[in-house]
Image: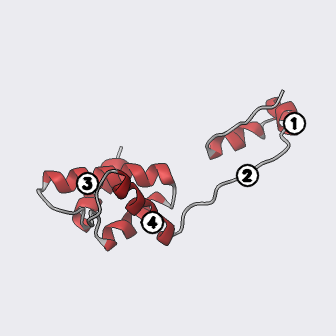
Amino acid sequence: MACLLIGQPKLRRDIKLGILAALDQRIAMRYVMDAMTRDETTSYIHHHVKLAGRNDTLFADDAVELIHNTGRGLPRTINNLAVQALLAAYADRKAIADLASTRIAVNEITTD
């Protein structure tokens, strides 16, 4: 039987546990996706904006920088931060997600 096992970094750590040693020994190939660079994050956000049907600027450059730094280049975190920044901008009746909107998003996501 062939199986493709995909998961978060926690899965990799869990497989290293002694109780999963037999599974760990049977994994033939491993790949770890690196975090995105700032330029990749910028392209990633712009690509998703285009997929949503928009061609105009929705994020200020400093907002993208904060999203990238806070999200550490991880796609899911970047998605969550970008959506929250857009919601904060909309709530403040702004045309784009600026640094202030993104700071609100960061506080919303990182505060328990």
Which label's residue is closer to the chain start, 4 or 2? 2
Residue indicated by mark 2? 31
Q: CA distance from mark 3 to mark 4?
A: 17 Å
Labels 2 and 3 touching (C-beta < 8 A): no
Element under label 4?
helix
Question: Which of the two discs, 3 and 4, sits closer to the camera?
Answer: 4
Numbered badge on residue 86: 3
Q: Is residue 97 above or below residue 21?
A: below
Element under label 2?
loop
Q: CA distance from mark 4 to mark 2?
A: 23 Å
Numbered badge on residue 26: 1
Q: Is residue 99 left or right of residue 90?
A: right
10 Å crowding of disc 1: few (<14), some (14-19), many (20+): few
Element under label 3?
helix
**Residue at 85% from the left image edge and 43% from the top image edge:** 28
10 Å crowding of disc 2: few (<14), some (14-19), many (20+): few
Which label's residue is closer to the chain start, 2 or 3? 2
Question: Which of the two discs, 4 and 1, sits closer to the camera?
Answer: 4
Labels 4 and 1 touching (C-beta < 8 A): no
Residue indicated by mark 4? 43
Residue 3: tell me if it is visible. Answer: yes
User: Where does the image place residue 4, in percent across and percent down from the top left?
Assistant: 73, 36
